[in-house]
Image (spheres, helix red, strand yellow):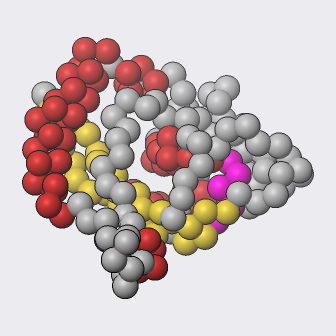
């Protein structure tokens, strides 16, 4: 069910509900998501961590945190799965922003740049392949260890999830609708 839910994000959509500081008369905030997948599920001290991979052309302020918050709302039953796709056409839903704890930028793709300047010696291609092994070790030994330890010590995600996700929650305003 989770992977099925993530598919609704793929493609070009109006991510109006997935950013801060917006107004009702604002033009659509279209963004293109190439992929949104479960990369892996990690278990550390009996706590399950889901690693998502999101690839898009560009992102707005807090967009990914709102996408994760929305995903949790649906998976916890606060938003019915059959209404989830309406989040892109509604201007009246209020989503919650997931905590930044555990959010990391793992890779930047420069496909357009590399294609545009492929024959220009003054603009060599940007390729992270030579650094990949070092970056993976750093992620595994430093970043993930910090994320795990922080969650175990502070329960940030648990304390964020528990009071928010039930249908009577003050954070959820009901069905998606257009004014």
> Residue most toward the front?
122
Q: Position of residue 19 (x, y in %)?
A: 64, 44
Q: Which residue is pictured at 30% across the width and 50% down the height?
A: 106
Front residue of this view, candidates 60 and 122: 122
Q: Does the magenta stretch include residue 112?
A: no
Percent from the top left, x then y, of residue 24?
Answer: 85, 46
Residue 110 appears left or right of 136? right
Q: Which residue is drawn at 60% across and 70% down?
A: 12
From the top left corner, tell me how far across and down residue 126 is, in percent. Answer: 31, 65
Q: In this view, does 32 lie above or below 100?
A: below
Q: Which residue is drawn at 18% across and 64% down?
A: 129
For this view, does 174 lie left or right of residue 101? right
Part of the protein shown in magenta: 13-17
Q: Could you tell me if residue 111 is visible in this image? A: no
Name which quarter of the figure residue 27 lies in: bottom right
Front residue of 157 and 108: 108
> Which residue is outermost to the top?
153
Give the quadrant of residue 97: top right
Instruction: Please state the total of marks drawn on the protein image.
Output: 0
Left or right of residue 157: residue 134: left
Horizontal side, residue 108 vs residue 12: left or right: left
Q: Which residue is drawn at 33% across and 77% down?
A: 121
The answer to whether residue 143 is seen in the rendering is: yes
- Tell me the quarter of the image containing the N terminus: bottom left
Where 87 sits versus 47, above or below? below
Residue 37 is situated, as x and y percent measured from the top left of the image, at: 35, 61
């Amino acid at each position: 069910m989770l992977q099925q839910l993530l598919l609704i994000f793929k493609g070009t959509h109006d991510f109006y509900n997935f950013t801060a500081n917006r107004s009702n008369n604002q033009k659509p905030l279209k963004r293109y998501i190439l992929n949104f997948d479960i990369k892996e599920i990690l278990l550390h001290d009996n706590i399950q961590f889901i690693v998502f991979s999101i690839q898009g052309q560009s992102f707005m302020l807090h967009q990914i945190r709102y996408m994760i918050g929305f995903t949790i709302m649906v998976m916890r039953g606060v938003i019915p799965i059959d209404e989830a796709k309406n989040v892109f056409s509604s201007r009246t839903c209020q989503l919650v922003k997931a905590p930044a704890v555990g959010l990391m930028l793992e890779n930047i793709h420069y496909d357009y740049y590399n294609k545009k300047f492929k024959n220009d010696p003054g603009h060599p291609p940007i390729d992270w392949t030579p650094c990949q092994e070092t970056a993976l070790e750093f992620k595994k030994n430093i970043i993930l260890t910090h994320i795990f330890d922080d969650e175990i010590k502070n329960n940030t995600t648990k304390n964020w999830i528990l009071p928010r996700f039930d249908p009577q929650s003050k954070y959820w305003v009901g069905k998606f609708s257009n004014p």
